[in-house]
Image (tube, coloured by chain):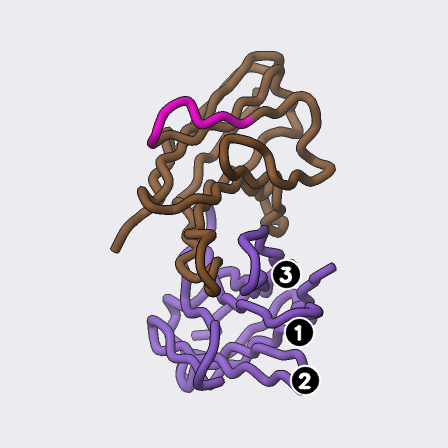
Chain colours: A purple, B brown
Amino acid sequence: AQSVTQPDIHITVSEGASLELRCNYSYGATPYLFWYVQSPGQGLQLLLKYFSGDTLVQGIKGFEAEFKRSQSSFNLRKPSVHWSDAAEYFCAVGAQSSASKIIFGSGTRLSIRP
Amino acid sequence: EPEVTQTPSHQVTQMGQEVILRCVPISNHLYFYWYRQILGQKVEFLVSFYNNEISEKSEIFDDQFSVERPDGSNFTLKIRSTKLEDSAMYFCASSPGTGGNRNYGYTFGSGTRLTVV
């Protein structure tokens, strides 16, 4: 069964600093990988997704993620964070070959230090 | 870009009451899903629906829950007798479900916040 691990429950970075949020997945077939962001009390906003092709994926709001099959990872990065990036970030994995559920990680809460 | 639409955005109901959450999936999608997120927790899969029947459900999706596609556009989640612990954000999603890239285009709605009092 597929699973997603986000090892960092809470991360605090200074405004303007770089950011990397970790995500490791376990999935037997070719995965379909997502990053979502959620502000308090709000819905899920898709930041980016990886399906195939270039393993470095560009998303919205200046985010990018890199798919590393050998490490079963899909880490999210941003070169310079803004105070508005403070939110909960969820990594998720789904199947490419069959229509099925998406499995979410437990999330990483990002706080920004002024 | 096509959207999954959920209504209402927020619903308050009394414990023991029935509640129906509504979703309009993307029009050419064939697979439909409900997910739940209890406050402060991760998003959990509830059920998937295809060809007018449930294709998969989680252990959370017990006899209190049911899903229906009453017409060609709506997809509903019914909770028969709500409990306090049903308070959560409920997300609907849909995916194309065809072709080699069956989940490309998997799209979530903005959610319905259900508060049971």
Task: Name which of mark 1 and mark 3 comes first in the sequence.
Answer: 1
- Taking depth in this image into account, of A111 and B90 the one nearest to the observer is B90
Q: What's the residue at 40%, 34% (across, down)?
A: B23
Image position of A37 (left or right of A94)? left
In screen coordinates, is B36 left or right of B104? right
Indicate the secondary structure of the residue bearing disc 3. Answer: loop
Magenta stretch encompasses residue A88: no
**Residue A71's disc number:** 2
Label annotation for residue A24:
1
- Kindly identify which chain the residue marked by label 3 belongs to: A
The residue drawn where x is 54% and y is 27% is B67
Q: CA distance from mark 1 to mark 3?
A: 9 Å
Residue tagged 3: A105
Q: Quadrant of residue A78?
A: bottom left
Badge 2: chain ID? A
Mark in the foreground, 3 or 2: 2
Q: Residues within 10 Å of mark 1 (few under 14, many from 20)?
A: many
Q: Secondary structure at mark 2?
A: helix
Circles 2 and 1, Cβ within 8 Å, touching? The answer is yes
- Residue type at numbered disc 2: Gln
- In the rendered image, the vertical position of residue B28 relative to residue A28, given as above or below: above
Residue B38, picture quadrant: top right
**Residues in magenta, as a range:** B67-72
Whether residue A49 is situated above or below residue A71 in the rendered picture: above
Using the numbered discs, state the Cα–Cα distance from disc 3 to disc 2 in whole angstroms.
17 Å
- Secondary structure, magenta segment, majority class: loop
Residue B44 position within the rendered picture, expressed as x and y whole percent measured from the top left: 62, 47
Tag 1: amino acid: Asn
Q: How far across and how far down the image is residue A75, in percent?
A: 56, 79
